[in-house]
Amino acid sequence: MTEGRFLDTDDGARIWFDILNPECTGTPLVLCDGLGCDGFIWPYIIQATSPTHRIVRWHYRGHGQSTPPTNRARMTLQLLAQDLRLVMDALELPQAVLAGHSLGVQVILEFYRQYPERVFGLVPVCGSYGRPGDTFYGLTFLRSGFEVLINLAKT
């Protein structure tokens, strides 16, 4: 992994990001990790695409090398999509292919909802199009199970 850099958000969070092969002119590929992941899913994708494409890696607030969120109540998919826009703006990428793993699928879909003109393509990998408790194999009872687990963890 290369050194990367940070961008500062308007609320004080620092978002880590990096670009591999910045000299390549092919369509950029932006990789969006899963919850608590730090790029473990991407080595083969990077190996296969890096000879011809710029590859962007970044960490969500509170993940990897990015700082924790300054206000946890603001942590939404909408905010993560806006952070992705900030990363693309910092790299001057008007458009990219977005690959998302797990939570990253929700992030890229939300980004597409907010900024469709900036998406060249979407690559969802092992993730849900909505809240996992609502969409996992169509088993809607899982949501209440997650809520019970969350409440138990809070006590």
Image (cartoon, rainbow, N blue to C red):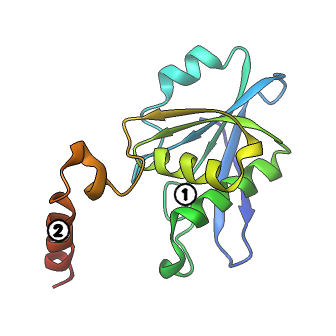
Where in the figure is residue 60, as x and y percent of width and height? 55, 57
- Write down the quadrant of residue 30 in the picture: top right
Of helix, strand and loop, which one carries label 1? loop
State the residue in front, 82 or 55: 82
Of helix, strand and loop, which one carries label 2? helix
Instruction: From the viewer's perspective, tell me whether residue 43 is left or right of residue 92.
Output: left
- In the rendered structure, which amino acid carries the disc numbered 2? Ser
Q: Residues within 10 Å of mark 2 (few under 14, many from 20)?
A: few
- Write down the quadrant of residue 114 in the picture: bottom right
- Write down the quadrant of residue 144 in the picture: bottom left
Image quadrant occupied by the C terminus: bottom left
Q: Which residue is mark 2?
A: 144
Q: Residues within 10 Å of mark 1 (few under 14, many from 20)?
A: many
Q: Which residue is mark 1?
A: 60
What residue is drawn where x is 42% and y is 47%? 129
Q: Earlier in the sequence, mark 1 or mark 2?
A: 1
Where in the figure is residue 151, as x and y percent of width and height? 18, 79
Where in the figure is residue 90, as x and y percent of width and height? 81, 52
- In the rendered structure, which amino acid carries the disc numbered 1? Tyr
Image quadrant occupied by the N terminus: top right
